[in-house]
Image: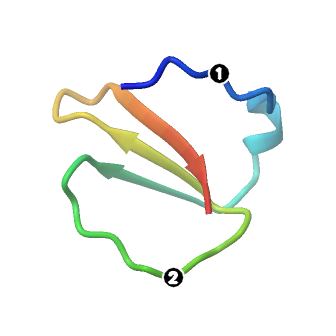
Amino acid sequence: MSNEVNDKAISTLIGKPSRVYTTGDRLTEDFIPDRVNIELSESGKIVKIWIG
């Protein structure tokens, strides 16, 4: 897992379309440029947050 920090403020993510999923879930392959994707571990901890 990367410890890289994105310089984008969390507040810029509020109000964007979003998708929350668990690692290993099947995802659609549609690209929505401003969608916030939040990946959770099986225990419910955030693994990754990405846009697209």
Give the residue drawn at x 76%, y 51%.
15
Q: Could you tell me the amino acid type at mark 1?
A: Val
- Pick whichever, 26 or 17, lies toward us: 26
* Residue at (58, 22) in percent of width and height: 4
Which of the two discs, 2 and 1, labels the residue nearer the N terminus? 1
Location of residue 40 with respect to 24 vertically, above or below: above
Hey, which quadrant is residue 9 in on the image? top right
Drawn side of residue 29 relative to residue 35, left or right: left
Image coords of residue 50 (percent x, y)? 57, 47
| SS for dot 2 | loop
Structural distance between the alpha carbons of marks 2 and 1:
25 Å
Give the residue pinned by disc 1.
5
Q: Residues within 10 Å of mark 2 (few under 14, many from 20)?
A: few
Locate residue 7, reporting x and y percent.
79, 26
The x and y percentages for residue 41 are 25, 34
Query: Label 2 amino acid?
Result: Asp
Residue 7 vs residue 33: left or right?
A: right
- Is residue 15 placed above or below 30 in the rendered structure? above
Q: Which residue is mark 2?
A: 30
- Residue 14, position in %: x, y? 75, 43
Q: Are marks 2 and 1 in contact (CB under 8 Å)?
A: no
Question: Residue drawn at (73%, 63%), measured in percent from left and top?
Answer: 34
Q: Secondary structure at mark 1?
A: loop
Image height of 41 relative to 1, above or below: below
